[in-house]
Image (tube, helix red, strand yellow):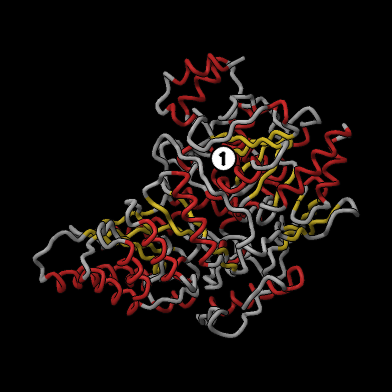
Amino acid sequence: MYKNEIERILEQVEKPARYLGNEWNSVHKDLSSIDVRFVFAFPDTYEIGMSHLGIKILYHLLNEQKGIYAERVFAPWTDMENELRKRNIPLFSLETREPLINFDIIGFTLQYEMTYTNILNMLNMAQIPVFSSERDNSHPLIIGGGPCAYNPEPIADFFDLFVIGEGEEVILELIEAYKSWKNKQEDKEVFLKIAAGIKGIYVPSFYKVYYNSNRTVEEIKPIDKSVPKKVEKRIIQDLDNAYYPSRFIVPFMEVVHDRAMLEIFRGCTRGCRFCQAGMIYRPVREKSIETLEKQGKELMDNTGYEEISLVSLSSSDYPYIEPITEKLLEAFKTRGVNLSLPSLRIDSFSLRMAELVQEVRKSGLTFAPEAGTQRLRDVINKGVTEKDLLECVKSAFELGWHNIKLYFMIGLPTETYEDLDGIIDLAYKIVRIYEDVTEAKDKRLKLTVSTSSFVPKAFTPFQWEPQFSIEELKNRQEYLRKRLKHRQITYNWHMRELSFLEAVMAKGDRRLSDPIYKAWLKGCKFDSWSEHFKYQLWLDAFNECGIDPEFYAYRKRGYEETFPWDHINPGISKEFLVREHRKGTIKAEPTLDCRFGPCSACGIKNLQGGRYCAY
């Protein structure tokens, strides 16, 4: 009933291609044969959401099943939202332009804590109550999954359930259970109890949180004996036989990662102590060269992309990266297809790989030393030395690169101003190396130094650590800014207030649902976009709810404290995390990658009988 009016609205908004839904390889089904309608909801813009690999995989997986139709919805930009609200048109899916309230299940991707207000805004635009306690059988089931689901507590009151871990198998099990329940027309709580019995499903309404007098969490207990005390994450064991699409949707407009994505392996054993992904995505599981070659050719045949990216947490850690790169380059050399290798490490091998895939178009190299001194790199277990970096950069200059980006974190545990001086020294050493290599004749060097602020995350060895105050982060950013003034150096930094709120959400508990809701009511949305970020409104929301956000971000935890996420089991043991925390913050001692040294006893071998860890 709204389709004609939506068409007229598209003529008035900035980027109508965000809302078309008829892109190449999008799926359109006959609704008469559909039992379950599912919509993937990404709480940010189309350009960002369409760059997310997880949605690409699950969208096509569900649409290859009989009786299931999966569609998409993204957070409408402010111009589109204004038009929809003005006409009282509810938020709709892209493929059929059906109001979201008419779907069976809405699945939100939880990639970043600062999209939480967008989730509430999307539910409200869909005319769906934002609190799960206010929804009944007539409303869609609201589920969430992704890295933020490993601490879902700040948004637990808004969701019916969360998927913990990898979704390819569990989402099909969940939908089958939903289909059976829907046919019986039983109460919603009956379905939630069934869902809670599926491994990897967390139903927050079946758990009660108890607090100590000092505001810390005392205990998280199931209120029903039929649900597990700890929810264990799901893992896909065999990636060669796991589902992977042979085609991706090709957007009509440019998106952030505008290329085909070929996932080469999952997990990481490097053990960087600040990195949540490296902990929660364990163990490492790799695809064979034969599988990658087949999947790569299928993707390029079915999408027409001019670039394919080999995706993982650290591409050069794939044991067969050189032969698969050569095979794909050979297969695509007559088709004008570029190959990209994101997430390369700082070493000569990675440089050889970068040279191989960028032999014609040297667009630039990105390195992430993370810290300016070897002491601090050992603290965070970043297995790279200054010698590695400088040798790699020198070789890059000799091979013709002149655009280098360096990523660092500031505010890391035990960081001092000497560590900041290390960042400055490193930048100027790179400038001098460039001058030596080019004999100071070439002025094309563009060195970008970017710093983000450390955010302690759940299930990392630094989850016990506080974040530096906003004022101290400002001082450190200013210190670097004043000392990195050079015509060939650009210094960028991350918004410190945003990092503070990210830390609050990352380490928060269920009491945060009220200030999140209040902040949204005050107009907070698109918080990760600087032009829309309203920090004072967030502070007002916390104040009105009687909650001190600094309690979550600035407080050092003791090992005996119960975390809000302790009832989630990612396969990594707390004993391992304590050990790594002490090695880092007390001894400044690195831990060897378990693929090249002894088993680090992280605990992943104990998950589901240890059949997933190959090292």
For the N terminus, give its image quadrant.
Answer: top right
In this picture, residue 373 sits left or right of residue 213? left
Residue 480 seen in the figure: no
Viewer-closest of 315 and 558: 315
| Residue ID for mark 1 | 42
Measured from the top left, where is residue 409 in percent x and y? 43, 63
- Rendered position, 137 above or below 225: above
- Rendered position, 567 above or below 42: below
Measured from the top left, where is residue 274 in percent x and y? 53, 66
Q: What residue type is labelled 1?
A: Phe
Q: Please rate how many residues cluster around mark 1, counting C-alpha atoms within 10 Å: few if below 14, some from 14 to 19, many from 20.
A: many
Count of picture labels: 1
Looking at the image, which residue sits at the far bottom? 598
Viewer-closest of 580 and 181: 181
Q: Quadrant of residue 387?
A: bottom left
Q: In which quarter of the image is residue 133?
A: top right
SS state under label 1: strand
Instruction: Residue at 57% x, 63% y: name it.
Output: 266
Measured from the top left, where is residue 254 in percent x and y? 39, 39
Instruction: Residue at 87% x, 31% y: name it.
Output: 185
Viewer-closest of 447 and 301: 301
Instruction: Residue at 15% x, 74% y: name it.
Output: 436
Q: In which quarter of the image is residue 515?
A: top right
Measured from the top left, where is residue 145 in percent x and y? 65, 49
In this picture, residue 431 sits left or right of residue 473? left
